Image (cartoon, rainbow, N blue to C red):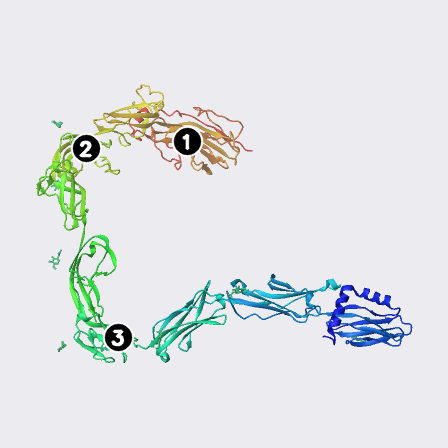
């Protein structure tokens, strides 16, 4: 704010600045005795700030004083020679307050200098254009209003942290405030998105204050590049109503491509575009759909906008409608012979053509009528429609097939009459019939048997061969065809028609019959091994035809070979060494007659007796076949003439065989009894032992142990065991014979005990005899003697309760087959006691009286000489001796009997009372 007289003030200030205030003050002090002073003389205050100024004088009696300033004051304090005043809201860039006092009519003055500074509170970067084309200059402008003093300011323009330009305003007058810095910058791609800012620095450090900095809000630059050319737009020229076509729009060299906007539209209908970016290229694709409302000429538009600029391309599109032509058959499936109408129609603008016949005008149909035949089945009809759109001819068509129903046909081409196949590999049997509807075909044996599997691959077996009736049937009818299936296969020689073995009969006619199976019929030829020529026709069979033949069967499918063995058979015939005319049979030898007969097959032989003696007897034969269980060897075979009859299927032959029979020795109980008995004293005899056998065997008997001495009469020593042996040419037989010697009985002892018995006591008599066979003992007691008992073998006679009636003669008799011998003992009773006296051998007269009393003498007399009848004599009152000459009839034995030695023996038994 310029004062009323800026000129002198400015000059003064300049002066101060040159000389300094102190020098000025000192000058005043030096000039005047009295002065006024102002403190502080020079001050730098922030704009709007406040300051106390102290105004003083050394005038002893100042009249008045004050402080002159245009600045607002807030408060004042006064003294006699001073005043202090607060200046507030100091805004003037520079003011000079004056302190004055009146002193002795003079005015004392002191002038001060107050300056203000202002921090760069507002640093403003002028807004940048919203989009800046790359390669063009743009202006960066920075304003710092009010900040000052300008001479202390420095402004810097920054891109990010990079300094673009820096400017200092030093040298500007102190009152200058505010600053502007402008720069022209070339926009580059890399500046896109860069932040630009402006920094202001107020450097008051030389004035004892600080450095005040501030920086503007950053401003972001957006740069872009958009080529001048329009985008490339691709789209259909024609678009059918209801169809969809792709549309694409491409623009290159775009920067920044992602920021670009695309607008694609068909007529007034915006298309939904898919945008893809590739480096600096942008491609928008969309699908254009023809709609009926858009029918007509339309524009396809593509607009690309970036940085506020637009590039646009457009194409003309004609949207048209072309309905499909319609091909109609009056009957899509017609039976043969029927008339079918074919009609072709299309939209009003279209021109149709059917089977080469064009419609007279657009929009009119074409019709065709035909009498359908089998050949029309599957025939296609074609309806062709054209439409002129925008100078272009469009076409559409429709087609349809006619089905003609007709009866099945079995053609030779699809179902051959003859099939010939090799056996084995899989084949597909085909018998196809034509016909509509498709006929079903089946082939079966005429007799209604096996059915052929048609159309499926399957193995060909010979069982399939034969004639089949193939029937094709559909709703339209039936066709029948006979078909022959021939299955070819290589020959096979089996055992039935070409046996491994054949048998021929000598002298007959035969042919080598070897038939092979195979289709076609094979040729068979048989060659004998080792020979070259094939055997053919009938042969008169001889034994040399036997052998091995090789038969080979051949046809077009292969060959087979087989070995056939031929056997020649013939009737039986005898040969002397094999079946001798004379045969000796030995009984028991088990030998069989060997009769070998030549013949094939081996003849069976049977030899049977032909005479009365051996009629029906069959000779046992050595079996040619070793059989474990042949006929058992015969035990007996009558000798004589036998006829051997050899038989096989080819005849029989007979031979006479003379059989003689011999046997080895044989002894048995009948010819040589095992037990033989001789009688002592008889004339010495030979053993009765003979043997059967042929030739007659010789028999020899020898005693075991000591040999039998020669003597004329049989003695007891001749008893013993003898061994007899019979021998002839076929062997020997032996037997053991036991010889016993028998003799007549002899009573060797007759005794009584005890020696004497009192009446009422018991006594026994004991009789012992020697004899072979052992003798029977019998007793004879006095008649009427009671209480007599016998031991079991009669050897002891016991008497209980002896009494007088027991007195008398007792006789013991020993008897066997060869004789009888007796001895007697007499019991005497002496009463009242009974004494038994035992007489000696011959002492019948001896009296043995041991005391007084009744004595009974028993006189024992032996019957003299002769045979004794074994007869009970107890019942008779007297001892009975039966003399007789012919009791035994034993001949020699009777002669050899010895005299009884018992003559006159008397045993006396005395019974004494107790
Ligand atoms: C003005 O003076 C009054 C009273 O002395 C004081 O309270 C106030 O703060 C002063 N104003 C300034 C701006 O210093
Ligand atoms: C941009 O400015 C510079 C310096 O001011 C000048 O030399 C240049 O030609 C200008 N460029 C354009 C494209 O205007
Ligand atoms: C588009 O059609 C208009 C009038 O129908 C024509 O003037 C213009 O040349 C056509 N534009 C193109 C690219 O064919
Ligand atoms: C069609 O067939 C019928 C009977 O078979 C016959 O009468 C008629 O003439 C035929 N039409 C034509 C066009 O051949
Ligand atoms: C095949 O068929 C014909 C007749 O069609 C017949 O003469 C002939 O014998 C048949 N067999 C063979 C093997 O050709
Ligand atoms: C068989 O025996 C008879 C009489 O003994 C004899 O004549 C004949 O020659 C014998 N035959 C043979 C083959 O030995
Ligand atoms: C031999 O045996 C056969 C068969 O058994 C019989 O036919 C034939 O007559 C017999 N011959 C004689 C001679 O017995």
Marks 3 and 2, the one that precedes in the sequence: 3
Q: Which residue is mark 1?
A: 812
585, 39: nearer the viewer: 39
Outermost right residue: 60
The image position of residue 382, as x and y in percent, is 23, 72
| 114 vs 539: above or below | below
Label ID, residue 386: 3
Label ID, residue 150: none
Marks 3 and 1, the one that precedes in the sequence: 3
The image position of residue 114, as x and y in percent, is 77, 70
Q: Quadrant of residue 731?
A: top left
Q: Quadrant of residue 880?
A: top left
C-alpha span from label 3 to label 1: 175 Å
Residue 45 shows up from this direction: no
Q: Which residue is mark 2?
A: 594
- The residue mark sitting in front, 2 or 1, is 2
| 722 vs 620: above or below | above
Q: Are marks 3 and 2 in contact (CB under 8 Å)?
A: no
The image position of residue 222, as x and y in percent, is 54, 67
> Which residue is depicted at the point 20% across and 55% down?
463
Disc 2 crowd rating (10 Å Cα; few below 14, some 14-19, many 20+) is some
Position of 118 with respect to 84 (left or right) is: left
Secondary element at image label 3: strand
| 285 vs 724: above or below | below
Dividing the image into 4 quarters, which one contains the C terminus?
top right
403, 552: nearer the viewer: 403
C-alpha span from label 3 to label 2: 120 Å
Secondary element at image label 2: loop
| 600 vs 886: above or below | below
Q: Is mark 3 within 8 Å of ligand 3?
A: no
Position of 789 with respect to 373 (left or right) is: right
């Amino acid at each position: 704010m310029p004062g009323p007289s800026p000129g002198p003030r400015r000059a003064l200030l300049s002066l101060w600045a040159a000389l300094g205030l102190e020098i000025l003050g000192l000058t005043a002090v030096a000039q005047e005795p009295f002065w006024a002073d102002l403190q502080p003389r020079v001050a730098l205050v922030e704009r709007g700030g406040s300051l106390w100024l102290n105004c003083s004088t050394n005038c002893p009696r100042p009249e008045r004083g004050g402080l002159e300033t245009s600045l607002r004051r807030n408060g004042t304090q006064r003294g006699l020679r001073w005043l202090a005043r607060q200046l507030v809201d100091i805004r003037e860039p520079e003011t000079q307050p004056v302190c004055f006092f009146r002193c002795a009519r003079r005015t004392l003055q002191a002038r001060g200098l107050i300056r203000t500074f202002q921090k760069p509170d507002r640093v403003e970067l002028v807004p940048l254009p919203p989009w800046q084309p790359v390669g063009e200059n743009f202006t960066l402008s920075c304003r710092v209003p009010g900040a000052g003093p300008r001479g202390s300011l420095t402004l810097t323009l920054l891109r990010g942290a990079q300094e673009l330009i820096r400017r200092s305003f030093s040298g500007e007058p102190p009152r200058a405030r505010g600053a502007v810095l402008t720069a022209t910058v070339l926009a580059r791609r890399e500046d896109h998105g860069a932040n630009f800012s402006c920094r202001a620095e107020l450097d008051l450090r030389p004035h004892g204050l600080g450095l005040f900095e501030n920086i503007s809000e950053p401003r972001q630059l957006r740069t872009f590049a958009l080529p001048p050319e329009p985008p490339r737009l691709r789209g259909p020229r024609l678009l059918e109503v209801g169809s969809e076509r792709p549309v694409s729009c491409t623009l290159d060299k775009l920067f920044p491509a992602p920021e670009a906007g695309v607008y694609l539209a068909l007529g007034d209908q915006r298309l939904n575009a898919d945008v893809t970016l590739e480096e600096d290229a942008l491609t928008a694709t969309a699908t254009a759909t023809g709609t009926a409302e858009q029918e007509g000429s339309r524009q396809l538009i593509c607009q690309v906008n970036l940085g506020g600029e637009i590039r646009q391309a457009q194409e003309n599109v004609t949207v048209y409608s072309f309905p499909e032509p319609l091909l109609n058959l009056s009957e899509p499936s017609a039976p043969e012979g029927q008339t079918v109408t074919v009609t072709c129609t299309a939209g009003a603008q279209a021109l149709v053509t059917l089977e080469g016949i064009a419609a007279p005008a657009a929009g009119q149909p074409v019709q065709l009528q035909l009498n359908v035949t089998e050949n029309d089945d599957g025939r296609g009809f074609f309806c062709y429609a054209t439409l002129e759109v925008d100078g272009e001819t469009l076409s559409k068509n429709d087609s349809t097939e006619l089905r003609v129903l007709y009866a099945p046909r079995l053609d030779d081409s699809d179902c051959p009459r003859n099939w010939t196949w090799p056996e084995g590999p899989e084949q597909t049997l085909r018998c196809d019939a034509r016909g509509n509807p498709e006929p079903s075909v089946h082939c079966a044996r005429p007799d209604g048997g096996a059915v052929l599997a048609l159309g499926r691959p399957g193995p060909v077996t010979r069982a399939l061969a034969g004639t089949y009736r193939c029937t094709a049937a559909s709703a339209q009818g039936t066709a029948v065809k006979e078909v022959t299936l021939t299955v070819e296969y290589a020959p096979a020689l089996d055992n039935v028609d070409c046996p491994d073995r054949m048998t021929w009969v000598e002298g007959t006619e035969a042919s080598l019959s070897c038939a092979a199976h195979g289709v076609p019929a094979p040729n068979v030829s048989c060659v004998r091994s080792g020979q070259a020529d094939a055997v053919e026709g009938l042969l008169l069979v001889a034994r040399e035809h036997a052998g091995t033949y090789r038969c080979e069967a051949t046809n077009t499918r292969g060959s087979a070979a087989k070995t056939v063995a031929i056997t020649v058979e013939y009737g039986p015939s005898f040969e002397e060494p094999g079946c001798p005319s004379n045969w000796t049979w030995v009984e028991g030898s088990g030998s069989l007659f060997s009769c070998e007969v030549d013949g094939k097959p081996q003849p069976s032989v049977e030899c049977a007796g032909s005479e009365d003696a051996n009629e029906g007897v069959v000779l046992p034969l050595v079996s040619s076949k070793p059989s474990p269980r042949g006929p058992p060897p015969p035990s007996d075979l009558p000798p004589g003439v036998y006829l051997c009859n050899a038989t096989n299927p080819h005849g029989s032959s007979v031979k006479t065989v003379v059989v003689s029979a011999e046997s080895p020795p044989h002894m048995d109980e009948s010819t040589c009894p095992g037990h033989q008995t001789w009688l002592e004293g008889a004339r010495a005899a030979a053993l009765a032992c003979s043997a059967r056998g042929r030739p007659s065997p010789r028999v020899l008997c020898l005693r075991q142990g000591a040999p039998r001495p020669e003597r004329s009469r049989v003695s007891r020593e001749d008893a013993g065991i003898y061994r007899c042996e019979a021998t002839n040419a076929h062997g020997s037989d032996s037997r053991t014979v036991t010889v016993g010697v028998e003799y007549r009985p002899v009573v060797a002892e007759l005794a009584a005990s005890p020696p004497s018995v009192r009446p009422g006591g018991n006594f026994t008599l004991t009789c012992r005899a020697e004899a072979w066979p052992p003798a029977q003992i019998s007793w004879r007691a006095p008649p009427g003697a009671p209480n007599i008992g016998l031991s079991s073998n009669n050897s002891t006679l016991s008497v209980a309760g002896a009494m007088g009636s027991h007195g008398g003669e007792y006789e013991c008799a020993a008897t066997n087959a060869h004789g009888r011998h007796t001895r007697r003992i007499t019991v005497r009773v002496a009463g009242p006691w009974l004494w038994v006296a035992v007489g000696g051998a011959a002492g019948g007269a001896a009296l043995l009286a041991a005391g007084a009393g009744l004595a009974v003498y028993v006189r024992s007399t032996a019957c003299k000489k002769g045979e004794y009848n074994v007869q009970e004599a107890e019942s008779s009152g007297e001892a009975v001796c039966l003399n007789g000459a012919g009791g035994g009839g034993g001949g020699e034995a009777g002669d050899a009997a010895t005299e009884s030695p018992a003559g006159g023996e008397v045993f006396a038994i005395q019974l004494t009372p107790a």
